[in-house]
Amino acid sequence: MSRQVTAEFLLSAFGKDEFPRPEQPEFAFLGRSNVGKSTLLNTLVGQRLAFVSSTPGRTQSINFYRVDRQWVFVDLPGYGYARVSKSAREAWRGVIEAYLLDRSTLALAFLLVDARRGWMDQDVQLKQWLEHYGCPYLVVATKTDKLNQKERSLSQRAFREHYSGEIVWFSARTGQGVKEIWQTIWKTKTS
Ligand code: GDP
């Protein structure tokens, strides 16, 4: 896609009182650290966007970006670092729950899962949590270029074990899925 996308960093927030005023439809991006979330965001907007460093174990911010003057992309901190303390994990939970639970402008959350690894415990927990609280979400399987044909069909089958809804298969390398994600954003915004 050669469409020019404009993107502007709005702010980083550590809690609810720092969130921007809820005005435009928001699309949130969630996933384990290293799932390819920054790369996906950068690919969608065609520029380096997610520049805030993600040091393992540190309480991370929620980063808001205004895209094409009409949407807000919300980069939620990654989870799943092997060596974080219980308090860091709870801080993570507090930050993302503060956002997801009570954000009137949240249009859709993209739940990113590494296509090679498939569902991991925390992905499944988060998915169940989104369902429990009625947050609309779409699953994106990332880094599909790393799979060969056979692995791809095994991965597709494994994804179905925990989820029967729509999955977007995404690769920043090949561009697979970029169009579908943009179409979803357009469709969600106008529906
Ligand atoms: P984040 O921690 O979720 O933001 O993950 P990053 O976007 O930083 O990506 C983690 C690593 O995976 C980096 O080395 C990326 O280059 C790599 N990566 C991300 N997306 C893809 C992809 O679609 N294909 C391949 N082959 N590598 C990817």
Image (cartoon, rainbow, N blue to C red):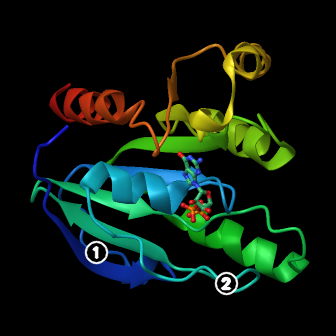
Q: Position of residue 151 (x, y in %)?
A: 76, 21
Q: Is mark 1 within 8 Å of ligand 1?
A: no
- Residue 190 vs 142, above or below: the answer is above
Please give the name of the residue rendered at 25% of the width and 28% of the height, measured from the top-left corner: 183
Q: Does residue 61 appear to the left or right of 150 in the view shown?
A: left
| Residue 122 in sight here | yes
Rounded to the nearest whole Å, what is the CA distance between mark 2 and mark 1? 24 Å
Q: Does residue 102 appear to the left or right of 129 in the view shown?
A: left
Q: Which mark is residue 171?
A: none
SS class, disc 2: loop
Residue placed under numbered mark 2 in the picture: 55
Please give the name of the residue rendered at 77% of the width and 34% of the height, measured from the top-left corner: 118
- 91 or 49, nearer to the observer: 49
SS class, disc 1: loop
- Residue 111 vs 190, above or below: the answer is below
Please give the name of the residue rendered at 28% of the width and 74% of the height, measured from the top-left corner: 20
Q: Using the rendered view, name the quadrant where residue 97 is placed.
A: bottom right
- 86 or 153, nearer to the observer: 153
Give the amino acid type for the residue marked by disc 1 in the picture. Answer: Pro
| Residue 101 in sight here | no
For the N terminus, the image quarter is top left
Label 1, residues with CA under 10 Å away: few <14, some 14-19, many ≥20: few
For the C terminus, the image quarter is top left
- 18 or 76, nearer to the observer: 76
Extreme-front residue of the structure: 148
Q: How many marks?
A: 2
Q: Which mark is residue 20?
A: 1
Please state the quadrant of the image where ligand 1 appears. Answer: bottom right
Label 2, residues with CA under 10 Å away: few <14, some 14-19, many ≥20: few
